Image (cartoon, helix red, strand yellow):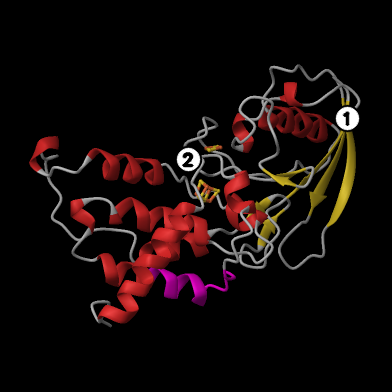
Amino acid sequence: MKLTLNIWRQAEGADNGAIKTYQIDGISGDTSFLEMLDELNEQLTHQGEEPVAFDSDCREGICGMCGVVINGTAHGRGVSPVRTTTCQLHMRSFKDGDTITIEPWKTPVFPVIKDLVVDRSALDRVVQAGGFISVNTGAAPDAHSTPAPKRQADRAFDNATCIGCGACVAACPHSSAMLFTSAKITHLANLPQGQPERKLRVKNMVGQHDAEGFGHCTNIGECAAVCPKGIPLESINQLNRDLIASLFSGDGKE
Ligand code: SF4
Ligand code: FES
């Protein structure tokens, strides 16, 4: 497969950055998108050029490190599954002769560090504000010692699959991180262990979300359309219900 790659290059955050065009040949459909970038970087290194900086770690769709905008879509679009992480996207989703435009997550809340690498630490600070439970750790308790109804356990698990990649923020026209925040809140709100701090958690996490400069949700749904883990918009309903309960019941104490 022969491809034309339009890639965002930015030496560091203070630079303006610009799209640069590269040609690459001999790419198999079984190559992953990041392996294709590895091959480009090998080519650039041999030519004495600076390789393209991009984030990755597990390359198995589980850590949330990777993430670029591919032809205008956060993480790109696969053939099967359509929604995937950048590292799980394979080149069989493209055709010989295609032009592919690759950009970083473009939102002021995730400033560019270099090329396709952005600073997503704002998401970490939202989790630090309340995405935890305060219990002593130790040996794992027996699963049946804290019973959870099946429906709630399933909702908690589905929301726990959020990998914190930030694609939802990159896709949102308001740079909102409501889908991410709601996944963390819905995960813990559906478990017995999450109840003691439930109201304070939502208040603190949404407060931190706003303090970081993430925008407000207007239910456009672009976030859920690109989420590689299928976190549903319904989770934002849970966040809003818990936030209202926290603000009006007096339990979300300072
Ligand atoms: S909600 Fe989805 S898109 Fe957003 S950070 Fe979590 S996994 Fe990524
Ligand atoms: S590199 Fe871990 S999810 Fe893509």
Mark 2 closeness class: few <14, some 14–19, many ≥20 residues within 10 Å: some
Residue 8 is left or right of residue 129, and the answer is right
Q: Is residue 95 visible?
A: yes
Give the numbered dot on residue 98: 1
Q: Is residue 132 above or below residue 97?
A: below
> x, y percentage for residue 156?
32, 46
In this rendering, the answer to whether 84 lies above or below 102 is above
Disc 1 crowd rating (10 Å Cα; few below 14, some 14-19, many 20+) is: few
Tell me which residue sits at (44%, 65%) in the image: 125
- Of 43 and 131, the residue lying toward us: 131
Amino acid type for the residue under numbered disc 2: Cys
Give the residue at x 39% y 59%. Answer: 238
For the residues bearing labels 2 and 1, Cβ distance under 8 angstroms:
no
Instruction: Please indicate whether residue 33 sits to the left or right of residue 56 in the image.
Output: right
* Above or below, comparing residue 37 to residue 30 in the picture: below
Q: Is residue 236 magenta?
A: no
Q: Is residue 212 magenta?
A: yes
State the quadrant of the C terminus: bottom left
Q: Amino acid at mark 1?
A: Asp
Q: Which residue is mark 2?
A: 63
Q: At 19% across and 54% down in the image, what residue appears?
A: 193
Q: Position of residue 240 (x, y in %)?
A: 42, 67
If you read the primary sequence from the N terminus, does the residue marked by circle 2 or circle 1 appear first?
2
- Asked if disc 2 is less than 8 Å from ligand 2, the answer is yes
Residue at image coords 24%, 38%: 150
Q: Examine the rendered structure and indicate whether residue 28 appears above or below residue 123.
A: above
Q: Secondary structure at mark 1?
A: loop
Query: Is the CB–ligand 2 distance for label 1 below 8 Å?
Result: no
Quarter of the rendering containing residue 131: bottom left
Q: Nearer the viewer, mark 2 or mark 1?
A: 1
Q: Magenta segment, which residues? A: 205-216
